């Protein structure tokens, strides 16, 4: 099961299969660090670093991490999708596209993202039941 949880400071946790990817969602854009890209695609961080260098991908933003006292390079959804296709990780890439779509169509009021994802899942499940009944 996939679970989205809104955290503080523009971050969202994407939980699936006992892994957590931390997504920075700022100005209607998904941003990920190399570490989180590696976690999302189940690859080594060095593999992600090599692809970024090979394709000359430039980071979108820098985020200051107070705990580590350093800037973290964040990469845009476009860059992440390119990396996903390069790795041939199509289902993980589709998951990011769906997550991006859900986040863009969601206002972060009192309803949590998880509730919205569950509602969308139920809606799709009901549509599939109708299709099965028709066949």
Image (tube, rainbow, N blue to C red):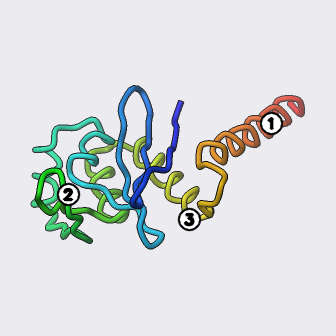
Instruction: Work out how far the residue at label 3 is from the one at label 2, CA to CA, in angstroms.
Output: 25 Å
CB within 8 Å, label 2 to label 1: no
Residue 85 placement, left or right of 119: left
Q: What residue is drawn where x is 36% and y is 32%?
A: 19
Badge 1 or badge 3: first in the primary sequence? 3
Find residue 6 and report its horizontal and vertical position in percent. Answer: 49, 50
Farthest residue to the right: give it. 134
Find residue 16 and report its horizontal and vertical position in percent. Answer: 44, 32
Instruction: Work out how far the residue at label 2 is from the one at label 1, CA to CA, in angstroms.
Output: 43 Å
Q: What residue is drawn where x is 51% and y is 52%?
A: 99
Q: Which residue is mark 3?
A: 104
Q: Nearer the viewer, mark 1 or mark 3?
A: 3
Res 75 → quadrant: bottom left
Residue 106 placement, left or right of 29: right
Q: What residue is drawn where x is 40% and y is 55%?
A: 11
SS of the residue under disc 1: helix
Instruction: Work out how far the residue at label 1 is from the one at label 3, CA to CA, in angstroms.
Output: 24 Å
Badge 3 or badge 2: first in the primary sequence? 2
Q: Which residue is mark 2?
A: 65
Q: Is residue 108 above or below residue 15?
A: below
Q: Nearer the viewer, mark 3 or mark 2?
A: 2
SS of the residue under disc 2: strand
Quarter of the figure that contains the C terminus: top right
Structural crowding at the residue carrying mark 1, measured as other residues with C-alpha within 10 Å and reported as few (<14), some (14–19) or many (≥20) = few
Q: Which residue is mark 1?
A: 126
Residue 96 placement, left or right of 105: left
């Amino acid at each position: 099961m996939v679970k989205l949880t809104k955290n503080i400071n523009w971050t969202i946790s994407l939980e699936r299969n006992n892994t957590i990817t931390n997504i920075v969602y700022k100005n209607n854009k998904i941003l990920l660090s190399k570490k989180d890209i590696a976690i999302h695609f189940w690859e080594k961080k060095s593999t992600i670093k090599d692809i970024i260098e090979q394709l000359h991908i430039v980071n979108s933003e820098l985020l200051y991490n107070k705990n580590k006292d350093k800037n973290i390079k964040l990469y845009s959804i476009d860059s992440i999708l390119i990396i996903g296709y390069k790795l041939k990780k199509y289902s993980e890439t589709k998951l990011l596209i769906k997550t991006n779509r859900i986040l863009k169509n969601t206002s972060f009021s009192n309803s949590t993202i998880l509730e919205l994802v569950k509602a969308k899942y139920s809606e799709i499940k009901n549509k599939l039941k109708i299709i099965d009944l028709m066949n």
